[in-house]
Structures are given as structure tokens and as C-alpha cells.
Image: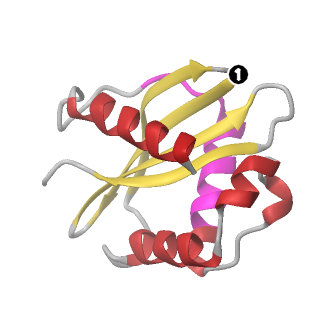
């Protein structure tokens, strides 16, 4: 869980440097599709744990999962857009930050895939910039 907190802090610091209307980055269509699917699963409260790395699966307690579901649904409905704004590759995990635009606000979705296993290694939200 300590690693998750450090990762969250790094993501928040990285996001602070992004402008509100960040440029998009080039991301594979399969990564976008998987991220959208993961978002839909989180929003529905039914996350497929077999798609997670063992470490993320261990960190994904019922309380964490419920908190993420609350975050994913707090702005209401489906995102109007799902835009990749940044991508990093750290310690064998490629993390893409997607800016999700809703009618009432923005949410940044951090979605990381393990480069070796192709399983989801990071999955969390950070409030996006104001509209």
C-alpha cells in the first residue's frame, strides 16, 4: 500500500504540471479500449480481478474498490470524452493518464499496464482541473 501512496503522490505532482487543456498523447487503441473497459467495471462496482497484477489485486480491498466506484460515478453518467494526456514508463509499468470530461467536471484516470504480464498494475483517479 505504501507503493500505491507513493505512486499517487507522483501522479498528483505530475498532474499539477499539466495544463487544464493538455495536449493528447499517442496511445495504442487497445490500451484505450482496456482503460475504458476498466473504467466501466469500476463504475459498475464489478471489477474483474483476474485482469489485475497480484500486487494490485492485494491492494484492491473492498473499501478501496467502493471508494473508486464512488469517484467514478460522482460526476454523473458516462464521460463525454476519454482523452489520453500523459504517459510514463516506470519500473516496467506503462501508465497512461486519461482526462475524463463529464458535464459537471473532469476526472483524471491513471491506468497502468505491467509491461511483462500485460495485467493492470495501476488503477486510480485524481480530480481533474476545473471546467
Q: Pick out the residue farthest to the left.
A: 131
Q: Nearer the viewer, residue 68 or 77?
A: 68
Q: Quadrant of residue 107?
A: bottom left
Residue at the location (62% across, 80% down)?
45
x, y percent for residue 4: 53, 45
- Kindly state the secondary structure of the residue where label 1 is placed: loop
Residue 95 appears left or right of 57: left
Which residues are the magenta region? 25-40
Quadrant in which the C terminus is drawn: bottom left
User: Count the marks: how many?
Assistant: 1
- Residue 36 colored in magenta in the image: yes
Picture layout, residue 73 above or below residue 97: below
Which residue lies under the disc numbered 1?
92
Residue 77 appears left or right of 110: left
x, y percent for residue 85: 39, 32
Q: Nearer the viewer, residue 43 or 124?
A: 124
Label 1: few (<14), some (14–19) or many (≥20) C-alpha neighbours in 10 Å: some
Residue at the location (26% across, 30% down)?
22
Please name the colour scheme applied to the rendered image: secondary structure
Residue at the location (18% across, 30% down)?
19
Picture layout, residue 52 above or below residue 29: below
- Residue 14 colored in magenta in the image: no
Q: Main secondary structure of the magenta part?
A: helix
Q: Quadrant of residue 72?
A: bottom left
x, y percent for residue 18: 24, 29
Picture layout, residue 87 above or below residue 54: above
x, y percent for residue 97: 45, 38
Residue at the location (31% across, 73% down)?
75
Q: Nearer the viewer, residue 79 or 92?
A: 92
Amino acid at each position: 500500500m505504501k507503493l500505491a501512496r507513493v505512486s499517487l503522490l507522483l501522479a498528483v505532482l505530475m498532474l499539477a504540471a499539466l495544463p487544464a487543456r493538455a495536449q493528447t498523447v499517442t496511445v495504442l487503441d487497445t490500451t484505450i479500449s482496456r482503460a475504458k473497459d476498466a473504467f466501466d467495471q469500476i463504475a459498475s462496482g464489478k471489477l474483474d480481478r483476474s485482469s489485475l497484477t497480484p500486487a494490485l489485486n492485494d491492494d484492491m480491498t473492498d473499501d478501496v474498490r467502493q471508494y473508486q466506484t464512488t469517484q467514478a460515478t460522482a460526476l454523473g453518467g458516462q464521460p463525454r470524452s476519454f482523452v489520453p494526456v500523459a504517459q510514463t514508463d516506470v519500473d516496467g509499468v506503462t501508465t497512461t493518464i486519461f482526462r475524463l470530461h463529464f458535464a459537471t467536471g473532469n476526472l483524471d484516470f491513471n491506468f497502468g499496464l505491467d509491461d511483462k504480464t500485460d495485467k493492470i498494475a495501476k488503477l486510480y483517479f485524481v480530480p481533474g482541473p476545473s471546467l
